[in-house]
Image (spheres, rainbow, N blue to C red):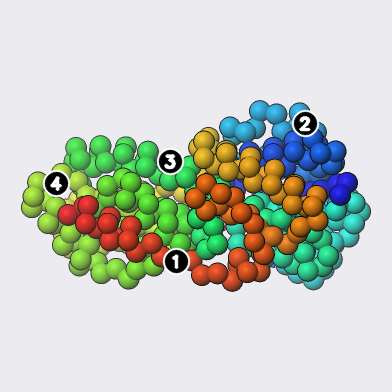
Amino acid sequence: MKKIGVLTSGGDAPGMNAAIRAVVRYGIFNNINVVGIKNGFRGLVEGDSMEMSLSSVADIIHRGGTVLGSARSKDFQEKEGFERALKNVKYLGLDGIVTIGGDGTFKGAMELAKAGVPTIGIPGTIDNDLAYTQYTLGFFTALTTVLESVEKIRDTSSSHGRTNVIQVMGRNCGDIALYAGLAGGAEMVIIPEVDYNIDEVCDKIMQGRARGKKHSIIILAEGAGDAKDISELIEKKTGVGTRYSVLGYTQRGGTPSAFDRLMGSQMGAMAVELLTSSVSNRVLGIKGNEIFHMDIEEALSMEKKFDEKSYELTKILSI
Ligand SMILES: Nc1ncnc2c1ncn2[C@@H]1O[C@H](COP(=O)(O)OP(=O)(O)OP(=O)(O)O)[C@@H](O)[C@H]1O
Ligand SMILES: O=P(O)(O)OC[C@H]1O[C@](O)(CO)[C@@H](O)[C@@H]1O
């Protein structure tokens, strides 16, 4: 193994820079040249890359986003684009690629592996929607950011005696909403994994008010509905002034948490170690304190288990 590539793809996530830094520095430490592919698979299709040096990853471990850039590339999924990507892998002389991203990125990595390019995947997405791993890079940072926003919104909500619907990201996965709801003491979480009944939501708000609650916080996962529609309905049904906030990109940016930096650093190093030991077509995950690896296809075929216990607990603790 002489030369490896590293790319970040899909939505960026805090902790990606720590992983890039680790791949580059651990690679160079092991006498491997590292090439940074810009903007995910798009850079592979377009041949847009840069040689990485020790100093190219200086001063990035604490930064959000990804210094390599990211993209959602349709071309890579087309026959012609994919072939161009393979040609560029050859042209660059890459013996393997570390791909950092979510399930889409891993599907791309799997295609490359099938075409004979060794790949290792690092889970990087705020959504925490990968079934095989307990956590993904960026999830805890995003959760902390959401909680900071919840706290600020609660102050104002409380002053004015209002209900607030706070819409968070996560695609079809309710993890950000669920854990922000539990950790933030929300009255209710609305997530795609559980059908909700608007009358139950309104009853809960009114019960809270009857026992003197000054505000109600509802955390809504983007995959479960639209904050504007739901807040209008709540106001209509309860008569309580209701506002909504969509947190959007605030959740994806910002300084990565200690956990995301640690996980990024450890996974980056392990990815290089695996490639140099001729282990490929694997993705890295975390369970407890242990980082492990498993077959990409097997990982992608797993179905994410819904944490019903935490959902029920959130409801109980907000009575
Ligand atoms: N089935 C597939 N085959 C080949 N490549 C794919 C496939 N699905 C996705 N990709 C590639 O991976 C890129 C990233 O995928 P996607 O946009 O779904 O984000 P992701 O990696 O799932 O991350 P996130 O969910 O955090 O945004 C796509 O833009 C595309 O280039
Ligand atoms: O930044 P984009 O391309 O609009 O994508 C938004 C999506 O990306 C994520 O932030 C990460 O997958 C999702 O939570 C969200 O649905």
Please identify the quarter of the rendering in which residue 85 is found.
bottom right
Within 10 angstroms of label 1, few (less than 14), some, or many (20 or more) residues? few
Q: Tell me whether the residue at label 3 lies in contact with that at label 2, contact meaning CB atoms closer than 8 angstroms.
A: no
Closer to viewer: mark 4 or mark 2:
2
Can you identify the residue that label 2 sits on? 54
Please identify the quarter of the rendering in which residue 51 is found.
top right
Q: Mark 3 vs mark 2: which is more N-terminal?
A: 2
Q: Position of residue 245 (x, y in %)?
A: 36, 48
Q: Mark 4 vs mark 1: which is more N-terminal?
A: 4
Q: Amino acid at mark 2?
A: Leu
Residue at 62% across / 33% down in the picture? 61
Closer to viewer: mark 2 or mark 1:
1
Residue 109 in sight here:
yes
Can you identify the residue that label 3 sits on? 145
Can you identify the residue that label 1 sits on? 305
Q: Amino acid at mark 1?
A: Lys
Quick check: is the Cβ at mark 3 less than 8 Å away from ligand 2?
A: no
Q: Secondary structure at mark 4?
A: loop
Q: Mark 2 vs mark 1: which is more N-terminal?
A: 2
Quick check: is the Cβ at mark 4 less than 8 Å away from ligand 2?
A: no
Closer to viewer: mark 4 or mark 1:
1
Within 10 angstroms of label 2, few (less than 14), some, or many (20 or more) residues? some
Closer to viewer: mark 3 or mark 2:
2
* Residue placed most toward the observer, 172 or 300: 300
